[in-house]
Image: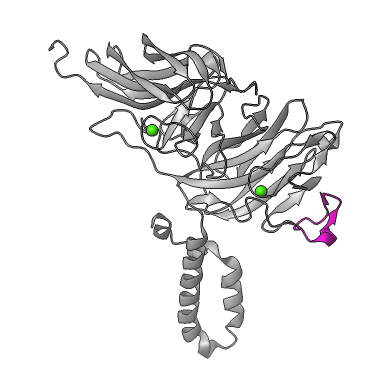
Amino acid sequence: MRGVSNKPFNLNPVLAHLVLDNNLSLSLCMKMEKLKLILVLFFAACYTSLSITDGLLANGDFEKGPKASELKGSLVTGQNAIPNWTISGMVEYIKSGQKQGDMVLVVPEGTHAVRLGNEASIKQKIQLVKGMFYSLTFSAARTCAQEEKLNVSVLPTNEKSDWGVFPIQTMYGSNGWDSYACGFRADYPLLEIVIHNPGMEEDPACGPLIDSVALKLLNPPKRTRENLLKNGNFEEGPYVSPKESWGVLIPPHIEDAHSPLPGWMVESLKAVKYIDSDHFSVPEGKRAIELVAGKESAIAQVVRTTIGKVYDLTFVVGDANNSCEGSMGVEAFAGKDTVQVQYQSKGKGGFVRGKLRFKAVSTRTRIRFLSTFYTMKNDNSGSLCGPVIDDVKLLGVRYPNAL
Ligand SMILES: [Ca+2]
Ligand SMILES: [Ca+2]
């Protein structure tokens, strides 16, 4: 219903133009005017219903491919050869099982993906609700050992630089694929999503593979009577593909206004992982956060507090049932107050509860969580993993001295 509130009358210049061309006679003008209105309304409704709120972009999984005549080997030769996408530079259409040297290429969703060569990009126009916040999720795999980066942009924008650079440097996933999410505000109803590989590698076959490009409308988080923190249960967040079992990495962000995890910012050097209960053990509800990179992996939220007032910060620390075994520790901070919660993980799910009582010394208190230790999965993948946090609540304590 949210999409309907937007009445994009001005969204269809092509249609408006066609209708005006049909106004051949002045005497028909009045009738045509009515027809025009109906047509525009009709098309506006169509457009609205086509706008994505949660799911893959059109052909976002690249299962619809180019015609044989627009392929030279795996190289895509036509700019519009991949349905719903426009490409530039060296873009390859990859089939699952295709070999690259000794490596067999795996595709996360379906049987096809694309590879972006040096300076190559893929883009797609999308219809969104102006002023709303969205998160974009995509999956990427690097195919060579060196660092790779991807620039993701949503254009046009009112901001000077509203594009994220997603560095693909560390593999967390066992099969080589990772999913990434970024957040943005739709400044215009018609936008273009661009994924660009800015790399200049010697080996042109070294570009990253891309699959499963999806969008999700983010509901603005609210504080409630039960919780002074926004989105403390992490239920609001980026799109997680039901077919992908490795969670979604939320890269470090400078501004929380663009966080794909509403209310929260990732203030560390490394990403945190957004996990879902379809594929992981989640302590509360359907979504939670896994702190995958030790002390380099932290999330924070700044909350309004009253100086001198006592608060209780409560939260859950557990493991995601993903073979992440060992001693885990989560450090919770409220301003300068801190508590460490220990958790012994068997890698099979489970959790303990933690609590930090503090007296506010400022009108704004930074609530922060980080993982004390670095942990690796015991499946020989070398993948980093860590403790899960969930169900984070902050409440004022009315009678702090009462037993
Ligand atoms: Ca696919
Ligand atoms: Ca949750």
**Residue 7 quadrant:** bottom left
Q: Is residue 389 magenta?
A: no
Residue 89 or 349: which is nearer the viewer?
349
* Drawn side of residue 320 relative to residue 125, left or right: left
> As displayed, is residue 266 above or below residue 57?
above
Q: How far across and down, in percent of the image, does residue 295 sit?
A: 52, 14
Can the viewer see residue 380? yes
Residue 274 or 260: which is nearer the viewer?
274
Q: Is residue 77 magenta?
A: yes
* Drawn side of residue 163 relative to residue 322, left or right: right
Q: How far across and down, in percent of the image, does residue 183 sit?
A: 52, 38
Residue that appears at 24% across and 19% down: 306
Where does the N terminus fall, quadrant-wise? bottom left
Q: How many marks?
A: 0
Residue that appears at 44% across and 31% down: 281
Residue 109 or 21: which is nearer the viewer?
109
Q: How far across and down, in percent of the image, does residue 85 sit?
A: 69, 54
Residue that appears at 47% across and 84% down: 30
> As displayed, is residue 185 above or below residue 18?
above
Residue 61 or 99: which is nearer the viewer?
99
* Drawn side of residue 39 relative to residue 147, left or right: left
Where does the C terminus fall, quadrant-wise? top left
Residue that appears at 47% across and 40% down: 278
**Residue 107 quadrant:** top right
> As displayed, is residue 64 above or below residue 212?
below
**Residue 236 quadrant:** top left
Which range of residues does the magenta coloring cover? 66-81
Can the viewer see residue 89? no
Q: How far across and down, in percent of the image, does residue 76 sit?
A: 81, 52
Which color scheme did the rendering employ for the protein?
A: one colour
